[in-house]
Image: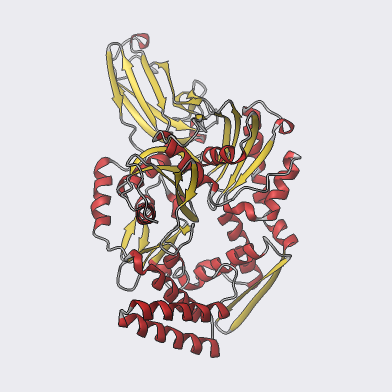
Amino acid sequence: MNTTKSKSMIVGIDLGTTNSLVAFVEEGSPKVIPNALGKNITPSVVGLNDDGEVIVGEAARQRLTTHPDKTIATFKRYMGTDRRIGLGRKQYRAEELSALVLKSLKADAESYLGQKVDDVVISVPAYFNDAQRKATTAAAKIAGLNLKRLINEPTAAAIAYGLHSGIDDSTFMVFDLGGGTFDISILELFDEVMQVHACAGDNHLGGEDFTKLLLHHFLDKSGLTFKKLDQESQALLLRLAENAKAVLSSGENATMQFEKKGKHHEWVVTIAEFEKIVEPLLVKLREPIVRALRDADLKASELDCIVMVGGACRMPMIRKNVGKLLSKLPLGNIDYDQTVALGAAVQGGLIAQDQSLNEVVLTDVMPYSLGVGVVNPNARFEGDLLFSPILERNSPVPVSKVEPFFPSHEKQKTVNLGIYQGESRYATDNVKIGLVSMPVTPGPTDENQLDVRFTFDLNGILEVQVQKGDDVKRLIVEGNPGVLSKQEVQASLEKLSELKMHPREKLENVVVLNRAVRLYSQNIGERRDFLADIISFFETELATQDLEKIADARQRVEEALDEIDDDPLGL
């Protein structure tokens, strides 16, 4: 596609744990932009090929089992932490790896739209904390994107649903279970206003957890220890478990088979066994649902409908479990994968004042309480602080509120305020996201009043300001290992600029070749010999640099691989 668009266009991106998408608004309707392979979905996988070039998406996913040391997936779970992940000889943060995925989506959008794409709305889990949101902001900056807005994933899904359904005056729940996170939002749509009443969630619950439980059960039955296996075997087992999970989404049983040191391990798992294995995860889905309903002051019977999004919702047991909990069947006409990206695109269109869109007023809420740690008069030990909320969860955003605080004793020279996120009465049971300090003059405590203001903006970013008398200081939240400084963002920009990205137009050849190599590693005997011949043939054709011959050869190779690769996920 090569079309003339307004320079004010803002695309929407669903940056997911497992898959990512980019979308835009055309003539009042959001549309997903296909990638270089013609697919709407790009796996959130980053790797290096044998020449040291960066590959993103399907080309990298095909190398997860054959080159686990040069391929990385599910790194979104480490956003907002200082964890480094090895890729080849270098270490990267989750922001940097996410930036590579964003750069790939940006390139796809620019190729499809025929114009430069800079402005973007990116969706994040509603329960992402301050550090995780700032990490996403940093990833966008590193990718060369101008972030106009972060939008909560369930809210984006609700926008897309509202536009699609054309239904007004309804109260509904968005149940978002993705690859790595779980979010619940309760919204009301009335008079072209989309109002979020409450949200809850779990940043450590997603489809990957169902996969891992299936994997560990197979390991237990086989007498294998995951940590004692080599990287390639570990990666293969994870993919086998993911494949079995997918098969169980549409069938009654699935077979897992694995060869190691001449020993064959096989397990046929039924859907009933799978449901029993993952029962602890199904139980964990209940608490956020209950919390969101309670905070919205609603009963399940008052919901008009339930909208389910996120790839993990393909598992029938999820729909059955939600229907049982809420005594209402979820809608069945929602695209689990694309809805969030479409909603993010609509939000981008609204920000850009796209005249083809009906104006929708969106109000969102903050997903967690924010406050400071204060001295506990009944402290059991030093540092045993109480949590004093300043902003409570599900307050409409943007929101700004100020509370007074005082030194704990007259000789105090500095007041250190720990910033916490959570709901526990005790500060240490919540998540500490930063520390701010203010010097004070020793003296009567009531003469050293500090007015502490918390401001939570539309992107879910927290700012802290302290005022003492006429002296007003805006303090930077420090001590959070998950937040990159401006200097570190610039360093990441320079670091990634040195990486060579594999040419986008050659990506489909890489995918086919990597798929053949992966199948070669997973087969033996006559199949392996046949695959060796296929790989040699395709490499020879690639060396000719004759585009017509390569295209013909690619089609022939794909047809041959399809006959061998009967795996529904292409694993």
Image coordinates for residue 144, horizontal then vertical, percent: 29, 48
The quarter of the rendered structure image containing the N terminus is bottom left
Q: Is residue 372 above or below residue 172?
A: above
Q: Is residue 43 left or right of residue 168?
A: left
Residue 496 figure quarter: bottom left
Residue 245 figure quarter: bottom right
Image coordinates for residue 39, horizontal then vertical, percent: 48, 61
Q: Is residue 354 left or right of residue 491?
A: right
Q: Is residue 378 above or below residue 69?
A: above
In depth, the one of 187 and 427 nearer the eye is 187
In depth, the one of 90 and 247 nearer the eye is 247
Image coordinates for residue 557, horizontal then vertical, percent: 47, 80
The quarter of the rendered structure image containing the C terminus is bottom right
Figure colour scheme: secondary structure
In depth, the one of 1 and 498 nearer the eye is 1
**Residue at image location 23% in from the left, 59% down from the top:** 498
**Residue at image location 49% in from the left, 55% down from the top:** 19
Q: Is residue 403 left or right of residue 502?
A: right
Residue 482 seen from this side: no
In depth, the one of 165 and 280 nearer the eye is 165
Image coordinates for residue 247, horizontal then vertical, percent: 65, 65
Q: Is residue 343 left or right of residue 292?
A: left
**Residue at image location 66% in from the left, 40% down from the top:** 306
